[in-house]
Image (cartoon, rainbow, N blue to C red):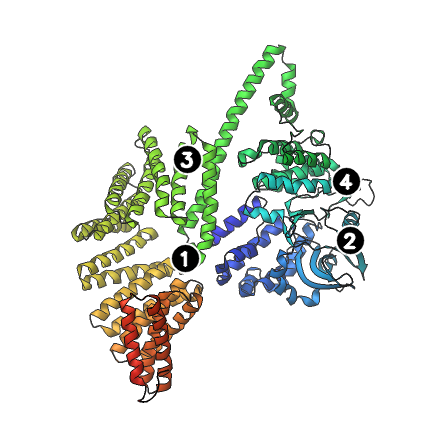
Amino acid sequence: MLDTLRTDQQDRWRRGEPVRVRTYVERYPGLLSQPRLLADLIVGELELRKSHGENPDVEEYFAQFPQCANQLSHLCGGNGQGATIAVTQIAAAASTNDSDGSFDTIASDASGELASAAHAHHSGWPKIPGFEVLSELGRGGMGVVYKARQTAANRLVALKVVRRDVLEALPLETQTCTVGRFKHEAQATARLQHDNLVTVYEVGEVAGQWYYAMRFVEGQSLHEMLRAGPLDNRRAAGYLEPVGRALQAAHDQGILHRDLKPHNIMVDARSDRPLLADFGLAKFTDGSQELTRAGEVMGTPSYMPPEQTQDASRVTTLADVYSLGATLYHVLTGRAPFQAASLADTIRQINTVEPVAPRVLNPAIDRDLETICLKALQKEPARRYASAGALADDLSRYLEGRPILARPLGPVGRTWRWCRRNPWLATLSATAAGLALLALLSIIVGYVNTKAALAKSEARLRQALVVVDDLFTRLSEDDLLNEPGMQPLRKDLLARALKHYQFFLQESGGNPAVRDEAAAARFRVGMITQLTDSRKAALPELLAAADLQRQLLAERPDDIARLKALADTLQALGNVHKEERELDAATDYYQQTAAIRQRMTELAPTNREYARLLANTRMNLGMVELDRDELDAARAALGQAQTARQTLLAEDPRATKVRRDLAMGAFNFARLALVAGDSAAAATELAAAIRGFDELLAEDPRSLALRANLSVCHRLLAEIRADGGEIPAALASYEAAQRHMRTLAMGNPDVAQYQAELAILAMSRGTLCEEREDVAGAKTAWTEAHAALTTLVAREPKSPDYRRDLATSEWALGNLELDGGDRVAAIKLLSSARDRMQALAREFANDAALARRLAAIAADLAAVNMPGEKTP
């Protein structure tokens, strides 16, 4: 599971969406019961934050997630303090820029989440007269933002201060520059007054501690809002139009922002009003107090114009126009216009590559809005909107339904821009003799570029599909994600994969060059639909995939990759129909699968994986026959599968998948024997399955599926032994089943399924102990069952099964207390059992079994009471 989450974490950061660990925890509380996983994710976040120029403080994470403090300390190479110092020193050496977008400085969303961390560090909060610090909102490389109350005005503020701990560790020259930049930011922001700018109330310095207080915004940033996906056209334009006005107001005051991006645009939760914040890289256009050295690059790369990537000291208001266009692009498409794997590649793209048209990424974008966005993103400053106000005017025209002034770039313009970026080819063209040669050259260049672009597009589609296929495979094979407590996370990640597949299918269209990939994507969509929706809902996609795969196979009948793809789809169709109890259809699909996989083994006789898959299909055919009660046919098919697996294992004794399949085959043979009434054979097969699963679990002790399989095998073996009168052996099997299930339940306390299975096992053991008159053993078992069921009923008070079993455990314990001579305890337990069963009998008046249990409990309770006493 860690690999899956880290892949998602890295992918989001790479796309310019720096998701935080606390976001995963908020959405999937089950992560809190996985301290090692949580610690690994935190370390991943620390690495990503450092690689993006941030200075993360490990102590924040120790305070936020105390349950993984030991694991985190170990991974960081020591105690929390040492780790904090190490990370701080590394980050301080890397950058002194405090406005890096690592947190939304005015957002209040984090206040509750960080409250515990803040209180843990109360002594470290700044003491600033006139302000009562309440909690920490977030921190960047050099600054910390606190939620505070301005006592004189009795209002909440966001209080930003320089981090003394990091500042004092810097060289004197760097300290001076850092304080100067902070004062510069405060001065710049304080000069601005606009309805869509965050207001600065006070700027000051106390004993060398520089601070400024600004409006506290109850809401979230555009960046946080985009985690749910792109905004619709009118909402996007509605937010960015007033931001453009605010930006123009700043420009009119002679101030450039230089770090405009979705992170720095807050949306007030009550008024839905956007507010521009964080002038940490602001520059006065009059040149006063300039802190950026010539040639220095400052800002957030994905939103920078080309000129800012070369020299941030020489940019003009048109740089902010570009950044506003880049922000609009992100809001509309869900991603920044440029974001490569490395900073160098991102800057290269900004300077040499045109952004992908927004409508390619999101076809729902209006053409006029795309035109506005692309005009603002022109690489040549003179071709952008002349001002932020002009861009806002065009957004206003769009919102009002009036014609916009911007016009999409035509073929001539695109050609001219291409020549500007490729001067060597333009020079070659200029030296050509005559218009005919120039025309011919244009045709050739057009053809070559079109062909190259098409090939590049196809390659990117394929590459993207490979990445998403890898994610899907991880989601399918990860034990932990298949557990009930982690299903919300798995469903969310599968939904992400589904969007990628659907986008691929839309983009590929009928392109014959990617038909195999399109068929595979159809298959994946069907599989995801089956996992997140229903088996029936998956059928149309799986059938569509099979049809396309059959067409492809008809062109090359011996293409083994196409054979495998079709076989996988037919196998999935067989599984759907088997689960739906449509056994004839299931048999038909399994038989088609077996025929194709047989052909694969003939074409590649040395490929053991193909032989293993064929054996699995034969086992599936056997299980269908078992469902039909055709026991001889089932036995023959299962035997054929097991024989093939034994042959494969002889060739490679350590083949993990084959050993797992053999153990599962033995378990299925046990099921067959139980249906046939052959308990001895069933016990033998279960013992073989247990040996196989035990060996595999010793090699992979973290596997939840193997441990669950073992618990089931031991429980079935216990029931067989109990029915045969082998009580001590049966108890030993129950205890083994409980041992495995207890490990699962303790490691995954939020998974009710494990707790319920543990209770059932304890009840079975308790019943068996009673039969052999082992009162102490029975009492221990029923007490375990009672404890587990009490927890389950508290968690799910409406569950009739849990309530019935809890009443049953109280009934059993009441009688055991009576046998032990504690009449008072017996009456209390039996009374509770009667009341619970009575409530169930009223809810389910037609359930005869409940009525019988209620009558039996009432009779036992009546027998306990002395004559003349009232039943409680």
* Quadrant of the image occupied by residue 787: bottom left
Mark linked to residue 483: 1
> As rendered, which of 353 and 777 lies closer to the eye?
777
Residue at point 17%, 61% (across, down): 677
Which residue type does callout 3 highlight?
Ala
Q: Residues within 10 Å of mark 4 (few under 14, many from 20)?
A: many
Relative to 781, residue 820 above or below: below
Q: Please name the residue that numbered disc 4 is placed on.
A: 251
Badge number at residue 518: 3
Q: Nearer the viewer, residue 309 or 774?
A: 774
How many numbered marks appear?
A: 4
Q: Report crowding for label 2: few under 14, some 14 to 19, many 20 or more residues within 10 A (C-alpha).
A: some
Residue type at the position of mark 2:
Val
Position of 865 relative to 546 (above/below): below
The amino acid type of the residue labelled 4 equals His
| Residue 179, numbered label | 2
